[in-house]
Image: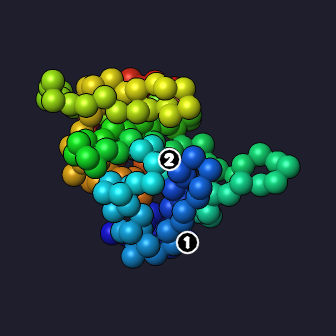
């Protein structure tokens, strides 16, 4: 797994707890954690030229684009929400699974607001892992999954 370019940092935000990956090995650990053992069911993934950070008495230092991941290892499902405010192909999109049936669980989108993804956003965790990996490698909306108009978060 290779990140976008030398010097690229992947930051994962679990509510107010930040974790960073500077190397491929650290990135593998972060992706595994998000999919297999997340400390919270929803996290945000950022790919940038520096680590994201909170700044005392100022705005947090984060890029505009991000991949939100809802992961449920107990059910084997997850969902994605991608935001890129300046993207020409849709600035807010959710993952889309045309085969998500009645077995697809309800997955949390916004823990603070109690907003859930539509069940059509539910993906098997292996697809979620693949999409996170692609996003971390390219910094772009993953093309390995399908997308549908999303909810703003």
* Above or below, comparing residue 18 to residue 125 in the picture: below
Could you say which is closer to the camera, residue 120 or residue 65? 120
* Above or below, comparing residue 138 to residue 6 in the picture: above
Report helix, strand or loop for mark 1: loop
Q: Which residue is mark 2?
A: 44
Q: Which residue does the image show at 45% across and 43% down from the upper left?
A: 42
Q: Give residue 77's position: percent from left, percent from top.
A: 25, 41
Could you say which is closer to the camera, residue 107 or residue 79? 107
How many numbered marks have been drawn onto this rendered protein structure? 2
Residue 140 visible? The answer is yes
Q: Quadrant of residue 119?
A: top left
Could you say which is closer to the camera, residue 12 or residue 106? 106
Q: Is residue 150 left or right of residue 57?
A: left
**Quadrant (top left, top right, bottom left, bottom right) of the N terminus:** bottom left
Mark 2 surroundings: few (<14), some (14-19) or many (≥20) residues within 10 A: some
Q: Which mark is residue 7?
A: 1
Residue 134 visible? The answer is no
């Amino acid at each position: 797994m290779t990140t976008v370019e030398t010097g690229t940092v992947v930051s994962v935000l679990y509510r107010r707890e930040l974790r960073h990956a500077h190397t491929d090995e650290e990135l593998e650990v972060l992706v595994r954690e998000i999919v297999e053992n997340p400390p919270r069911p929803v996290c945000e993934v950022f790919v940038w030229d520096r680590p994201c950070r909170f700044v005392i008495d100022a705005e947090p230092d984060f890029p505009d684009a991000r991949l939100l991941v809802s992961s449920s290892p107990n059910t084997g499902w997850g969902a994605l929400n991608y935001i890129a405010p300046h993207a020409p192909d849709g600035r807010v999109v959710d993952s889309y699974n045309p085969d998500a049936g009645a077995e697809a669980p309800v997955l949390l989108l916004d823990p603070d607001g109690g907003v859930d993804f539509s069940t059509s956003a539910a993906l098997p965790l292996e697809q979620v892992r693949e999409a996170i990996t692609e996003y971390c490698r390219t910094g772009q909306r993953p093309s390995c999954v399908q997308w549908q108009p999303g909810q703003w978060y």
